[in-house]
Amino acid sequence: MPFSSFLAALFQSLAREGVRFCVLRNYEGFPSANAGNDIDFLILPSELPRAIRALRSIRQVRISGYTELPFVANVFLAGVCPAPGSRALQIDFDLNLTWKGLPYLSAEAVLEAAIPRQAGNLEFFVPSPVHEAIISLFGSLLIGGWLKEKYFPGVQRTFAGDRSGAIAALLPQFGDKAATGLVDAVIDGSRDRILGCIGPLRASLARRSLLRRPVRGALSVARHYARVFAFRHSPQQLETVCVLGSDSCGKTQLIEALAPMLRSSAGVVEKRLLPRRPPCASEASGAHAGADSSAGSSRGPLVSMAKLVFELLKEWRSRFAEKKALTLCIFEGYDLLAGPQRRHDGGPMWFARLAGRLFPSPDLWLLLAADLDAIGDADADGRESKGEEALPPEEFRRPEAGRSFAKAGNRRVLLDASQAAGSVAEEAYAAIIDTLAGRAARQLKRRFRALDAADAAGGNEGRTGGRA
């Protein structure tokens, strides 16, 4: 969907839902181009369900991911082209303008002071110049502890043109000394002085917020840390896809092609090598079990069992590792069709099978096979329809493994590597987006079921508050 068409549809849907919003920054290229990596909207927390409904009402796009914190909701949309080669776009709904749960600007005040802006046939709202300058500055300075040079020239011009207005906007939350010191440092352009203001600004904001509303302020800070910790260490923020197949089928090239196609379908798209795992029950045949046992018997069963437990804990620990955003991880797996290659190093086979079952499974398996017809039509004796003679033992396993894979479940997709590389990449991309969109739909249904019911019970009062 062209970016300009998406913007028009989104603004119309938000207005239809009665959502009061303003675009915080990077709107200079609208409606034809997006200057940033995402679009930042400021809305009130109570209007988030209607904002999500507005997005879901755009039929040409699909929500491929959703995350929410007390101060922002991140939505990842597949099917939008904000730049050449792009297929997805991230939408951020800022719900509060806070540091550690403490507001540095009132979202209600920013929305009330928002001004209309015209871009082609589109009309939308943006913050007042002073509010936009403060938001752009504090997004890195107060929250991250560093200065983002991209926005600094505009912030400096705004503060210099309206010094008293900038101080007045900062005064309620920071006090006269901290507010004046920051504004003057920005006008002077002294980076050292600006960075030196971070500590006094944070201390003043915390002190004044906790003194005015001690219970509410303390609960806000505690809720912030609890939600951020749960977000960063939750396995729900990790989506995993494993691509299996031999290198001769173009597995590595497929993964390289998928990475740019999937950009912005999640917060982070990364590639990893699938760790070797012990054989599970369906993979461990007697012959291979005996060979593996003799190969690793010198290690001793207790050492092998301890190693399996360590690998199992390590694998599960990676699921709970710290994540800064919704992460899509594409694993490059081994050649499943070449037969079981994973070893249990001399430990009991029952223990290896148990450990294999306990390993976390990817959300989607993609099998890249050179000949899908052979997988579907090969006879049990290993003779293929191409008229070849009896195949070597390792080839007997290829059609059987492929058929088992194809019947294993809905999370497994067979890809025909004999097709053009572009066609294979498109099929893999579609399968991944289908998986992500299905998971996001279930998450949104759970999250907004109660909110939608409460909103419906409250009537249509909120739908008349938007500025269309």
Image (spheres, rainbow, N blue to C red):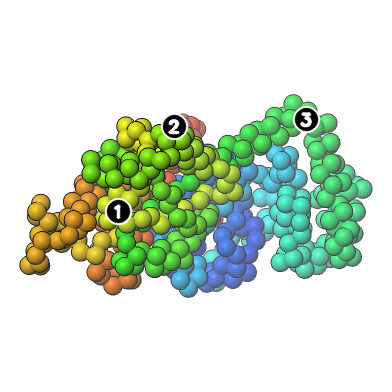
Sequence order check: which comes first, mark 1 or mark 2? 2
Residue 310 x/y as whole percent = 49, 37
Within 10 Å of disc 2 (Cα), the crowding (few <14, some 14-19, many 20+) is few
Sequence order check: which comes first, mark 3 or mark 2? 3
Nearest to the eye among marks 3 and 2: give it: 2
Spatial separation of the CA atoms under disc 3 and disc 2: 59 Å
Image-based side of 161 in relation to 423, left or right: right
Tell me the SS state at disc 3: loop
Residue extending farthest to the front is 298
The amino acid on which the numbered mark 2 sits, given as a three-letter code, is: Leu
Residue 410 x/y as whole percent = 27, 46
The quarter of the rendered structure image containing the N terminus is bottom left
Image-based side of 325 in relation to 56, left or right: right
Q: Residue at x 77, y 68 (%)?
A: 153
Residue beneath disc 3: 213
Sequence order check: which comes first, mark 1 or mark 3? 3
Residue beneath disc 2: 302
Spatial separation of the CA atoms under disc 1 and disc 2: 28 Å
The amino acid on which the numbered mark 3 sits, given as a three-letter code, is: Arg
For the residue pair 157 and 371, the one nearer the viewer reads as 371
